[in-house]
């Protein structure tokens, strides 16, 4: 099969394209012929060495979509021919979705509704599930005000939509351009704040009657930690799934007086119950046609190097997908 791999960490030049053996599904596994593979920031960060080299050879990418072509012992043969999307393809495993085939545990291949394209399916494992868990955790957001940082990004665009679907009362977001503001507003945001030209805390307080928001879905807790007492209402929660710095400095006094909380999580490590809840909600919305997918570009598998460079540089507004 054609595949992408790297044998050492480094810039995109370490990515190789060629032939690797087609895997066979083991006990409890399915073999998926991949149509698409999603490229996420965690993919280029891992390639550069954020996790070192966990295996001698790595085929990158955790997200993808395709069709089950074979099943291993213990898996219902009725699943052969089923359209699926994949989560954690390359998490704690050497071979991910940047290939024509992947063999993995059957539970990690989720049925993909007929009305959802394979390119959209390649965006669900990390972006969509991250956004959804950030909103579902700790009681959800029904009737609450929500701030989504980076509302035009891959996770943020889904988070804005899902906050609306989950019954949030008001949705604010931060963006960095007029085009990104339009993108987030079209997804369902009530207010877009340009963090480059406006005081985010001032705008949030003005929009919430001086209270702050009940829930924050945050891609950079390191950069926003000191602002949380201004951004969050008393008892508010920041669901933190990312940081641009290795440390976050919180202001203790105002934080404890307001009783605010931070829920750290990484989508790869959701427990079985959390993942099942998120997948169940997402499946319902997908089947009803309620989810917008922002596919910024589709690139051939052989051009994976260019795809990684584009995602690392932030050149696109939306998800970049490889055609496998």
Image (spheres, helix red, strand yellow):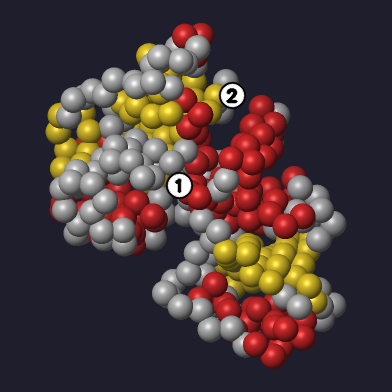
The one of 173 and 122 positioned closer to us in this rendering: 122
The residue at the point 81 percent across, 53 percent down is 142
The residue at the point 26 percent across, 51 percent down is 54
Which residue in the rendered view is the most extreme toward the bottom? 253
SS assignment at label 2 = loop
Count neighbours of disc 2 (C-alpha within 10 A) and say few if under 14, some if 14 to 19, many if 20 or more. some
Residue 87 in the figure: left or right of residue 186: left
Identify the mark at residue 272; answer none if there is no mark: none
Q: Nearer the viewer, mark 2 or mark 1?
A: 2
Residue 256's spot in the image, x, y percent?
72, 83
Residue 266's spot in the image, x, y percent?
51, 56
Identify the mark at residue 113; answer none if there is no mark: 2
Quadrant including the N terminus: top left
Q: Is residue 185 shown above or below 283? A: below
Q: Is residue 175 shown above or below 9? A: below
Q: How many marks?
A: 2
User: Disc 2, disc 1: CB below 8 Å?
Assistant: no
The residue at the point 85 percent across, 57 percent down is 143
SS assignment at label 1 = strand
Identify the mark at residue 319; answer none if there is no mark: 1
Residue 278's spot in the image, x, y percent?
64, 41
Quadrant including the C terminus: top left
Q: Quadrant of residue 59?
A: top left
Q: Earlier in the sequence, mark 2 or mark 1?
A: 2
Label 2, label 1: how far apart the Cα atoms are: 19 Å
Residue 73's spot in the image, x, y percent?
40, 14
**Residue 300 in sight from this viewpoint:** no
The residue at the point 29 percent across, 20 percent down is 24
């Amino acid at each position: 099969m054609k595949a992408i791999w790297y044998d050492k960490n480094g810039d995109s030049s370490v990515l190789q394209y060629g032939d690797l053996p087609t895997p066979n599904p083991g006990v409890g596994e399915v073999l998926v012929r991949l149509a698409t593979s999603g490229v996420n920031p965690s993919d280029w960060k891992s390639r550069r060495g954020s996790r070192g080299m966990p295996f001698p050879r790595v085929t990158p990418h955790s997200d993808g979509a395709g069709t089950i072509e074979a099943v291993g012992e213990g898996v219902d043969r009725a699943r052969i021919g089923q359209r699926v999307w994949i989560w954690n393809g390359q998490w704690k495993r050497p071979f991910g979705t940047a290939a024509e085939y992947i063999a993995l545990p059957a539970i990690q291949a989720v049925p993909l509704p007929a009305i959802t394209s394979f390119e959209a399916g390649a965006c669900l494992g990390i972006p969509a599930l991250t956004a959804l868990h950030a909103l579902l955790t700790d009681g959800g957001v029904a009737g609450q005000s929500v701030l989504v940082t980076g509302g035009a990004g891959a996770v943020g665009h889904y988070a804005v939509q899902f906050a609306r679907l989950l019954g949030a009362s008001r949705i604010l977001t931060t963006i960095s351009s007029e085009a990104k503001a339009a993108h987030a507003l079209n997804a369902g945001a009530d207010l877009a704040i340009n963090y480059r030209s406006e005081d985010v805390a001032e705008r949030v307080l003005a929009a919430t009657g001086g209270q702050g928001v009940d829930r924050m879905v945050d891609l950079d807790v390191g950069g926003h930690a000191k602002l949380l007492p201004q951004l969050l209402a008393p008892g508010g929660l920041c669901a933190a799934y990312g940081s641009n710095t290795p440390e976050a400095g919180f202001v203790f006094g105002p934080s404890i007086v307001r009783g605010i909380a931070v829920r750290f999580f990484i989508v790869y490590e959701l427990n079985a119950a959390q993942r099942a809840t998120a997948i169940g909600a997402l499946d319902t919305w997908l089947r009803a046609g309620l989810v917008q997918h922002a596919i910024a570009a589709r690139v051939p598998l052989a051009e994976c190097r260019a795809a990684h460079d584009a995602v690392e540089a932030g050149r696109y507004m939306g998800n970049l997908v490889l055609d496998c």
